[in-house]
Image (cartoon, helix red, strand yellow):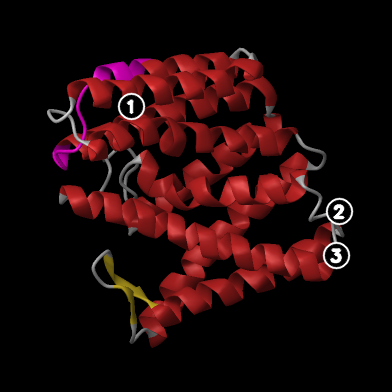
Amino acid sequence: MVKRVLSALIGAPLLLGITWLGGTYLAVTILILALLALREFLVIGQQAGIASNTGLTFFFCALWLFIFVIGYTQWLLPLGVIWFIIVFAGYALAYPDRSYTEASYNFLALIYPVLLFTYLFYLRELPNGFLWAIYVFVTVWLTDTGAFLTGNALGKRKLAPRVSPNKSVEGALGGLIVAIVSGFFFWMWTDLGSLLVILMLSLLTSIVSQMGDLFESAIKRSAGVKDSGNLIPGHGGVLDRFDSFLFAIPVVYFALMIGLVG
């Protein structure tokens, strides 16, 4: 627990500071975090027996991230389509020696630990982007804390026992309530958007952040591992620390992009 707290006390201000700087500082940080998360994801796939040719996957994802950092964003979607063709054409040519599950996992490597990370940069680039980044960070952190405390105090019914036996329905509801309250104070502090929309967005962000946590737990469960890595003392790997954010950040970004939050 001491290591977990110390890591948070160091890591949270550092992440907030780099996000405040934005621009190249944030883009390079995202590149580093995404590559670390990608490595963890591929190792988990190997341990689960559903990933091979990880060298090619890592190279292509690194290339995709390099294109992202230097700002040639118009190439990102075409590169994603090219990767889709490479992966599934390889599956077709190698069938039945290569499984559909393996091909899907290699394709997901570009989406989950790589592409989703970049939405932090895009969110920061929006008007009031730093405030919205803080909103996501705080909503996810408080959801996690609220779920943990409520689950310990009141948890009885298991939420997803085969994936994460310690998580409860009561804890999940506690996380949702804390996120909604946090959204109210965010609205009071910033006066961004309407209160009703912010509360609904807080509810949705809290839900998807918890789903992100469960998704990563399910992947680890399939490989029989407890943590995705040991890079962050008390937290495990990069995926362990950012699993909830990877689901939550794009939701808030797209809510802003389509005008749900004025």
Could you say whether the residue bearing mark 3 is in a helix, strand or loop?
loop
User: As shown in the figure, which amino acid type bears the numbered disc 2?
Assistant: Gly
Would you name the residue on which mark 2 appears? Answer: 262
Q: Is residue 88 magenta?
A: no
- The residue sitting at 75% across, 62% down in the picture is 186
Disc 3 versus disc 1: nearer the observer: 1
Q: Amino acid at mark 3?
A: Ser
The magenta region covers 47-59
Give me the C-alpha separation between circle 2 and circle 3: 7 Å
Residue 45 lies, with reference to residue 189, above or below; the image says above
Residue, disc 1? 88
Q: Is 246 placed left or right of 107 in the picture?
A: right
Asked if residue 91 can be seen in this view, the reply is yes
Q: Which residue in the protein does label 3 denote?
A: 194
Crowding around mark 2 (Cα neighbors within 10 Å: few <14, some 14 to 19, many 20+) is few
Q: Residue at x 81, y 50 (%)?
A: 259
